[in-house]
């Protein structure tokens, strides 16, 4: 199954998706003493459902062997959706859960897990580039026949 480098890139997307369950995305720090802190990871319902389509794009691309145009289209959709998911998760953390105000007394701190979401578009881009090179190699081999 691992014949081409794009397979490794797309499996990397699945590995990053698995890491998102264990890495903190944001932390709500109490501004005043006596309050507890809240930690958000990839297991948060909203964050989970936002990024749920990203591994679907990866798996669909993995199982479309030989249909280069569709593979590139799924990688492109994966790039755009993963960027959209990053901004959506960032907005969710910033606006809905962690509004720092005088009433709640909380300050939001973004953790490095949020930036793991930016690895998705890089891996999809590298996979799309490898798929395009593979397609060019196949067409060059067809011309030689």
Image (tube, helix red, strand yellow):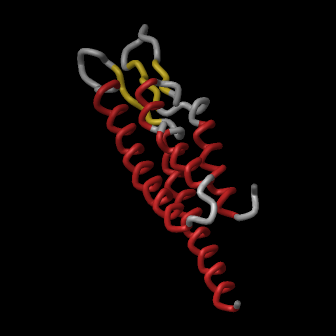
Image quarter hosting the C terminus: bottom right
Residue at the top extreme, as displayed:
34
Q: Nearer the viewer, residue 143 or 60?
A: 143
- Numbered label tally: 0
Location of residue 58 in the rendering, given as x and y in whole percent from the top left corner = 56, 50
Q: Nearer the viewer, residue 33 or 125?
A: 125
Task: Name the image quarter holding residue 139.
Answer: bottom right
Location of residue 23 in the rendering, given as x and y in whole percent from the top left corner = 58, 33
Question: In this image, 126 relative to 90: left or right?
Answer: right
Question: In this image, 53 relative to 15: left or right?
Answer: left
Location of residue 24 in the rendering, given as x and y in whole percent from the top left corner = 54, 31
Residue shown at 56% from the left, 69% from the top = 129
Residue 54 in the image: above or below residue 137: above
Location of residue 108 in the rendering, given as x and y in whole percent from the top left corner = 38, 29
Residue shown at 46% from the left, 17% from the top = 37
Question: In this image, 55 relative to 96: left or right?
Answer: right
Task: Name the image quarter holding residue 19.
Answer: top right
Image quarter hosting the N terminus: bottom right
Residue shown at 42% from the left, 24% from the top = 28
Residue 1 in the image: above or below residue 111: below
Residue at the front extreme, as displayed:
145
Q: Nearer the viewer, residue 92 or 72?
A: 72
């Amino acid at each position: 199954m691992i014949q081409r480098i794009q397979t490794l890139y797309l499996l990397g997307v699945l590995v990053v998706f698995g890491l998102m369950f264990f890495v903190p995305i944001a932390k709500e720090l109490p501004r005043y003493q006596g309050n507890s802190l809240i930690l958000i990871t990839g297991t948060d319902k909203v964050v989970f459902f936002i990024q749920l389509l990203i591994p679907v794009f990866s798996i669909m691309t993995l199982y479309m062997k030989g249909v280069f145009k569709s593979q590139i289209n799924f990688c492109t959709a994966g790039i755009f959706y993963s960027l959209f998911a990053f901004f959506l998760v960032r907005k969710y953390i910033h606006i809905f859960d962690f509004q720092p105000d005088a009433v709640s007394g909380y300050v939001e701190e973004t953790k490095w897990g949020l930036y793991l979401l930016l690895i998705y578009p890089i891996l999809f881009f590298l996979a799309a580039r490898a798929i395009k090179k593979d397609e060019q190699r196949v067409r060059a081999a067809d011309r030689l026949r």
